[in-house]
Amino acid sequence: MTKTYGNNRIFTAAIYLLVLLTMFVAAAPFLWLVMVSITPMKYINTVPLQWIPPEINLHYYVDVLFGSAGVSDFFRSVLNSLTISTTTVVVSLVFGSLGAYAFARLTFPFRERLVLFVLFTQMIPGVAVLIPIYTIFKNIGMLDTKMAIVLTNITYTLPFVIWVMRGYFFSIPRELEDAAFIDGTGRLGALFRVVLPISTPGLFATGVFVFLNSWNEFTTALTLSNSIQSQTIPVVINFFAGRYTADFSLMAAAGVIGCLPPIVLSLFFQRYLIDGLASGSLKG
């Protein structure tokens, strides 16, 4: 009995140690980013690296927020990122939910093959189709617009929403919709009055992932934007690096500020995020 109790304590301690190690590995890049953002440049390249800087300097945040370092367009890029990411989330959830419901509940020819085709589009590297997308938007005069970036992001996120929400809809009992049909509700009525309200955790979880994907997207925004009119945070932060030198502390400060909206969003919808991922993974 004592031996079993001792083994359980060792196992529990090992689990806690593994969790702490995983948390440190996950948090280390962000902690390092924060550290660099408050460290003077003369200490950045010292060997060995110092987690705690000899001096703490917050003027990099002042430079980013108030533009004293020539980065006054940063707030405009934040607004662009919010607009692009929010629009991508709304459009992807609306059309993705309709498509996912059709694949989950309706019967039509080649349904399973079409689902696999939707999944296949996720396997195509984005850079492989970026040049054709650039050419199309150039020919129709939509380069350097937020709408061009939104439409491109939707082509990446819509298949993801369809695939995830299809699995979530499978986890909802059909009896709930059958009861709505008996009460005289049509297919769309059952979707909007019964299925979607129950699917709120899944919608929030999927929406958060779509928002994070759009917020952090760099290659598409860099290719399709030429001015601050449509440039997002990752693109503007990239321009903080000069041709021959890079102010890593300034870039780190901008990165920390750019991380705050996704962090706040994830913390605010944390409960929905966990519930949505747990429920959506049960069936697919």
Image: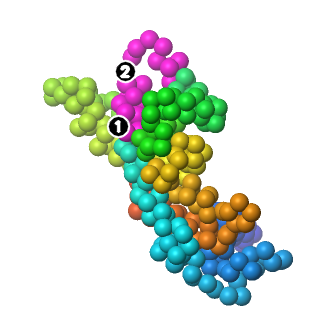
Query: Callout 1: 10 Å neighbours few (<14), some, many (20+)?
Result: few
Direction from residue 219 to residue 181 in the image, left or right:
left
Stretch of the chain drawn in magenta: 91-115
Between residues 111 and 77, which one lies in front from this camera angle? 77
98 over 241 or under it: above or below: above
Residue at x 53% of width, y 47% of height: 226
Place of residue 231 in the rendered image (x, y in percent of width and height, measured from the top left): 50, 52
Place of residue 86 in the rendered image (x, y in percent of width and height, measured from the top left): 39, 49
For marks 2 and 1, give the one nearer the viewer.
1
Question: Does residue 261 appear anywhere in the picture?
Answer: no
What element does badge 2 sit on? loop
The way the protein has been coloured in the rendering is: rainbow
Query: Callout 2: 10 Å neighbours few (<14), some, many (20+)?
Result: few
Q: Which mark is residue 94?
A: 1
Residue at x 41% of width, y 41% of height: 147
Queried whether the magenta region covers residue 93, the answer comes back as yes
Between residues 3 and 112, which one lies in front from this camera angle? 112
What element does badge 1 sit on? helix
Dot 1 amino acid type: Val
Q: Quadrant of residue 28?
A: bottom right
Residue found at the very far bottom of the displayed protein: 54
17 over 266 or under it: above or below: below
Label 2 – label 1 distance at C-alpha: 18 Å
Between residues 273 and 55, which one lies in front from this camera angle? 55
Residue at x 44% of width, y 43% of height: 145
Q: Which residue is mark 2?
A: 106
Q: Main secondary structure of the magenta part?
A: helix
Dot 2 amino acid type: Leu
Residue found at the very far top of the displayed protein: 109
Residue at x 46% of width, y 18% of height: 111
Place of residue 178 in the rendered image (x, y in percent of width and height, measured from the top left): 26, 27
Position of the N terminus, as image quadrant, is: bottom right
